[in-house]
Image (cartoon, helix red, strand yellow):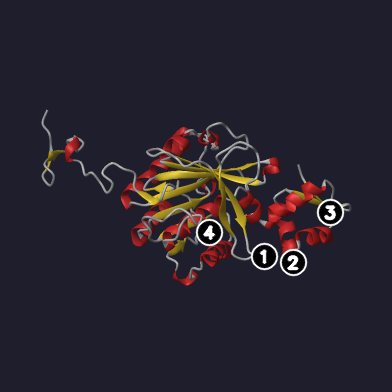
Amino acid sequence: MTHHRDRSTDTPLDLLPTSRAAALDPGRGAGALHWRVDQIWGDGVGILGGPPKSTKSWCGLDLAVSLASATPFLGRFAALDPGPTLVYLAEDALSQVRARIAGICLHRRLDLSALDLHVITAPAVRLDQTADQSRLVATLDRLRPKLLLLDPLVRLHRLDENSSADISALLGYLRELQRRFDVAIVVVHHMRKSVRAHLGQALRGSGDLHAWNDHGAYLTRTGPGGERLRLTLEHRAAPALAPLELCLVSRDDGTATHLEIAASVTGGNGQEPPAAAATRSLHDRVVLALRQAGRPLSRVQLRDALRVNNNRLGTVLIDLERSGRVCRSDAGIAVLP
């Protein structure tokens, strides 16, 4: 058989290029995982998963702000390879996206106007469509971000999530972006409510999603009534940290909302770490006060018990009603099971 050669490379066109193993580029870490954020996320792709209302978007933005500002993720994990970041939050109004990022910046004493974090403002992005794939490629080529956050996966396509063929094609496109632009990719995705022993297997849809991961970060609610947040990590090429307990906290005036580490999960005694009680968010404090009361409470009773501003309490109660954690009746405000 006659081979047709490509004169520029002197490689037959009907053969794939090959190299001896010793001649391969050893890369930056000589075989070691290159961390973007220490022990949290490296160069690769992965899923930030969790059930609804588990602060997935907050966690993703915290990661993006950390790399864009060279400040530690969750106040603890160093940004080792900082630079510009690019985020797309398909389910949140742009004003809400700005408010969340501004709150994290306020907590870290960062100048929002100097933050090298870019937000995709398109009303819709469909990564199963050629036109939007091309637009994302051009955007990455211009900005060259260190991290791309896509939140959530379900709003980025019209494919069948249970179809391995459909999902593998989409994931293949994202993997190509990661390699082409050397960008770490975080995809936010929902998990089934029934938590499994291996959290990656609880991701909704095709099993290809879990197999695709270089990194996985899973947020789940634990404890009585799901008052605690737990972050569990996994990595394809590195050992994972022990799970972390997190709290979504704000200042007394409701500003600077951000995630904080309450404790590392090292034991099974079921006791809440003291740090968690000190930094619990007002949302969780309201729920806990209602549980401890064992009966409906009026807004005045809650305000006096928690010693908080009445307007702020009202905003929190609206959020808790919308998320299905409390309900109001003539008898007062009660926590839902």
The C terminus is located in which quarter?
Answer: top right
Q: Earlier in the sequence, mark 3 or mark 4?
A: 4
Task: Give the distance between the C-alpha atoms of the residues marked 3 and 1, in whole angstroms.
Answer: 22 Å
Viewer-proximal residue among 140 and 218? 218
**Element assignment for label 2:** loop
Write the residue at 40% across / 38% down. Answer: 236
Write the residue at 47% across / 71% down. Answer: 113
Residue 159 screen position, x and y as percent? 50, 41
Q: Is label 3 or label 4 in front?
A: 3
Task: Give the distance between the C-alpha atoms of the residues marked 4 and 2, in whole angstroms.
Answer: 36 Å
What residue does disc 4 label? 123
Task: Give the distance between the C-alpha atoms of the residues marked 1 and 2, in whole angstroms.
Answer: 8 Å
User: Tag 1: residue type?
Assistant: Asp
What residue does disc 1 label? 252
Q: Is label 4 or label 2 in front?
A: 2
The numbered mark at residue 309 is 2
Callout 4: 10 Å neighbours few (<14), some, many (20+)? few
Give the answer, above or below, for where 112 lies relative to 203.
below
Viewer-proximal residue among 173 and 199? 199
Task: Give the distance between the C-alpha atoms of the residues marked 2 and 3, in whole angstroms.
Answer: 17 Å
User: Tag 4: residue type?
Assistant: Pro
Task: Give the distance between the C-alpha atoms of the residues marked 3 and 4, in whole angstroms.
Answer: 41 Å
